[in-house]
Amino acid sequence: MSRRPEKPGEPIGPSVGIATRTRPKTKKPDMYKVLLLNDDYTPMEFVVQIIQDVFHRDRDAATRIMLHVHQKGVGVCGVYTYEVAETKVARVVELARQNQHPLQCTMERE
């Protein structure tokens, strides 16, 4: 049994609505490159060890990165979100200072 519209333009029959929910689109976080800078004082073996410990690279990959830093003056150790990159930079600098090496590490937006 259908009902009669009480007002002009009102639909006949039971009212049915569709609930719509919009989902906000999330933006991917900006990524940051963690860079090691070459210096003339930090031993190569120490740099390889840092790359292995902080960036979890195997010995061969760590050696390749270290040689790239040595030859080019700067090298990318990894690409991370801001907070992770910031933590890795701080860890490298802390380990270098503890071992009395002037190794520098920075980050830049990719």
Image (cartoon, helix red, strand yellow):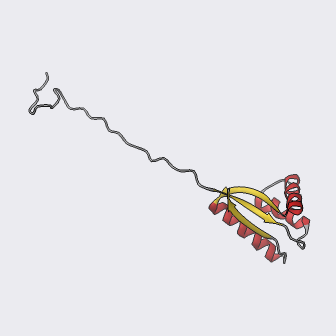
- Taking the spot 91% from the left edge, 69% from the top edge, the residue there is 43
- Taking the spot 53% from the left edge, 50% from the top edge, the residue there is 27
Nearer to the camera, 49 or 74: 74
Residue 106 locus on image (x, y percent): 73, 67
Position of residue 22 relative to residue 84, above or below, is: above
User: In this view of the protein, can residue 88 be seen by the observer?
Assistant: no
Q: Is residue 72 left or right of residue 17?
A: right
Q: Is residue 84 left or right of residue 42?
A: left
- Taking the spot 84% from the left edge, 57% from the top edge, the residue there is 65
Using the rendered view, name the quadrant where residue 19 is placed: top left
The image quadrant where one finds the C terminus is bottom right
- Taking the spot 84% from the left edge, 75% from the top edge, the residue there is 101
Residue 83 locus on image (x, y percent): 63, 62
User: In this view of the protein, can residue 6 be seen by the observer?
Assistant: yes
Nearer to the camera, 87 or 41: 41
Residue 88 locus on image (x, y percent): 71, 64
The image quadrant where one finds the N terminus is top left
Q: From this viewpoint, which residue is outermost toward the top? A: 1
Residue 15 locus on image (x, y percent): 21, 32
